[in-house]
Amino acid sequence: RVRVFDRAFKGHPQPALVLTHLASARIELGELDAAMQALDQAVLRDPQLALARNTRGHLRRRLRQIDGAREDLQMALQLAPGSADVLNNLGNLEKDAGNWAAAERCFLAALKQQPTMVHARLNLAEVLRKAARCEIQLGERALFFPSDAALASWMAQAHERRAEIAYD
């Protein structure tokens, strides 16, 4: 897979895009240093490519380079306002830092753009659970505990006033 991208790079009209996809392949293979080099080159070639910024921000978060991750993800969001993928990655960064309210806002915004985004729903459920919002909303009389995905879906819909959660 990597060799195909290496060959495609030569003469391609959008080399930064090819480098970004090459980096994604290298991330999948666990070649994180090589992926970072490809992403750095992609951003140098096209600083306005939101996909490169988003991918590099995701990788930097994974490598615990928090300041760099935040910078890349915020730039990606400026370049692609409302991108569900960028919002989800930014939400994960906020979640890692324990910024529950900011993470919740990011995941809800991602779900507004892409309501079926499973990762954002699961991430939202995790944030609500860690912030103790679920327990507060369910109260002491809760008789069952829904899956994270179901809870995230319900909470997101209730938050947007598209649904109401009624308790007996």
Image (cartoon, helix red, strand yellow):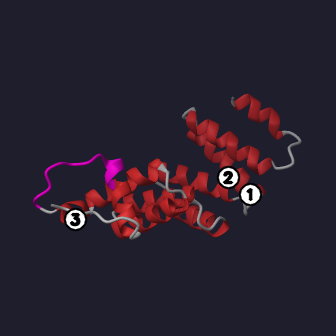
Magenta segment boundaries in residue numbering: 140-151
**Between discs 3 and 1, the one toward the N terminus:** 1
Q: Residue at x 38, y 55 (%)?
A: 153
Provide the residue designation for mark 2. Answer: 40
Label 3 or label 2, whichever comes before in sequence order: 2
Which residue ends up furthest to the right in the rendered image?
A: 11
Position in image of residue 68 (x %, y %): 54, 61
Q: Which mark is residue 137?
A: 3
The one nearer the camera, 24 or 138, is: 138
Inspect the image, locate mark 3, and give the three-letter code of the amino acid beneath it: Gln
- Residue 165 is left or right of residue 107, and the answer is left
Q: Residues under labels 3 and 1: Cα distance?
A: 47 Å
Residue visible at 66% across and 54% down in the picture: 51
Discs 1, 2 touching: Cβ within 8 Å: yes
Residue linked to disc 1: 44
Q: Is residue 32 left or right of residue 105?
A: right
